[in-house]
Image (spheres, rainbow, N blue to C red):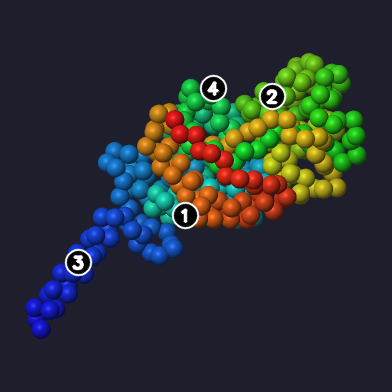
């Protein structure tokens, strides 16, 4: 009998060691601790897992993607995508520090290490890849225009070519650069702020005639104030959103890409959408193809 008890204890110990070595979750369906996952020595994943904390850059002013809720924390599709990544790192959700990251500082906060990753309606662009790297894309938006509900004069970007109408966007954003192709006089027609909330307020107050950014962001504003705003025309660009990480951190980028692809197949990507931006009527579409480079 004594031999059987010793054998049972040894078998249990062997099983426990095997589970730990395989990186199994310590709690089924729950957050995991640093000891429950293993990563390559010296990798960003190992560093974050050992620290058991992470800083994530996101927007605080974009309904459906990243906006501060009643809890005082940002809520939205970008936020949920970031949470999927953090979970796979074995870091509890309450150890995420969300850092407000306006468009104009996104590359800066990645390059200088202020945050560990950025999920902030961040369009993948070659010029940005000169300073940082991208995982993804995990969503493809399109630029559009929001106007007052009773405005029939603006029907698309070509409406700004006559030089009489002002359009607002955000400093350092892709939409701000794109709309320059359509305005007659950039200096007098293009109004730039650091957040889209300020653009919305300027439109409502009559300081500008329109706001331009990605369609899903505008749909969020319209959903909250249908009596004041509407869309003008169709999308006129394609904006693939990616996760920003440090330049040439290939292992971390591949790790995130694997998580995104997993989320497409296990339903967590669609659930994140349905719980956030999907409530505003925007279409999710098919999962975008991951760009591995």
Q: Of the residues under marks 3 and 4, which one precedes in the sequence?
A: 3
Task: State the SS at label 2.
Answer: helix
Which residue is tagged 3?
13
Q: Residues within 10 Å of mark 1 (few under 14, many from 20)?
A: some
- Of the numbered discs in the image, which one, if any, rests on residue 152? none
206 vs 96, left or right, is: right
Task: State the SS at label 3.
Answer: helix
Q: Alpha carbon of mark 3 to alpha carbon of mark 1: how far?
A: 30 Å
Q: Identify which residue, 275 or 173, lies in the foreground.
A: 275
At horizontal 82% and vertical 35% (from top left) the residue drawn is 232
Task: State the SS at label 4.
Answer: loop
Q: Nearer the viewer, mark 4 or mark 1?
A: 4
- Where on the picture, by quarter, is residue 20? bottom left
Q: Identify which residue, 128 or 293, lies in the foreground.
A: 293
Q: Visible in this render: residue 138?
A: yes
- Of the numbered discs in the image, which one, if any, rests on residue 178? 2
At horizontal 77% and vertical 45% (from top left) the residue drawn is 222
Q: Alpha carbon of mark 2 to alpha carbon of mark 4: how far?
A: 14 Å
Q: Alpha carbon of mark 3 to alpha carbon of mark 4: how far?
A: 53 Å
Which residue is tagged 1?
93
At horizontal 40% and vertical 49% (from top left) the residue drawn is 89
- Where on the picture, by quarter, is residue 192? top right
Q: Of the residues under marks 4 and 1, which one precedes in the sequence?
A: 1
Image quarter (top left, top right, bottom left or bottom right) of the C terminus: top left
Q: Contact (CB < 8 A) between labels 3 and 4?
A: no
Q: Alpha carbon of mark 4 to alpha carbon of mark 1: how far?
A: 32 Å
Q: Alpha carbon of mark 2 to alpha carbon of mark 1: how far?
A: 36 Å
Q: Position of residue 272 (x, y in %)?
A: 58, 53
């Amino acid at each position: 009998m004594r031999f059987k008890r010793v054998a049972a204890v040894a078998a249990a110990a062997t099983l426990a060691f095997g589970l730990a070595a395989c990186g199994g979750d310590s709690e089924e369906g729950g957050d995991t601790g640093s000891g429950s996952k293993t990563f390559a020595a010296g990798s960003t994943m190992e560093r974050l897992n050992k620290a058991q904390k992470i800083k994530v850059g996101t927007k605080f002013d974009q309904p459906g993607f990243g906006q501060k809720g009643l809890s005082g924390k940002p809520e939205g599709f970008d936020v949920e995508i970031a949470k999927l990544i953090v979970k796979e790192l074995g870091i509890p959700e309450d150890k995420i520090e969300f850092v407000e990251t306006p468009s104009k500082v996104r590359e800066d906060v990645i390059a200088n290490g202020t945050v560990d990753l950025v999920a902030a309606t961040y369009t993948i662009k070659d010029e940005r890849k000169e300073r940082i790297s991208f995982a993804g894309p995990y969503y493809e938006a399109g630029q559009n225009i929001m106007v007052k509900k009773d405005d029939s004069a603006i029907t698309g970007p070509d409406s700004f070519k006559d030089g009489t109408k002002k359009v607002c966007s955000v400093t350092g954003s892709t939409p701000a650069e794109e709309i320059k192709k359509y305005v007659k006089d950039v200096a007098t027609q293009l109004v730039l702020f650091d957040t889209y909330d300020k653009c919305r307020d300027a439109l409502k107050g009559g300081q500008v005639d329109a706001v331009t950014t990605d369609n899903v962001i505008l749909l969020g504003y319209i959903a909250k104030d249908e009596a004041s705003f509407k869309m003008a025309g169709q999308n006129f660009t394609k904006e693939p959103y990616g996760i920003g990480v440090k330049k040439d951190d290939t292992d971390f980028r591949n790790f995130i890409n694997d998580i995104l692809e997993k989320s497409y197949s296990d339903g967590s990507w669609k659930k994140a959408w349905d719980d956030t931006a999907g409530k505003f009527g925007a279409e999710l579409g098919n999962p975008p193809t991951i760009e591995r480079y």
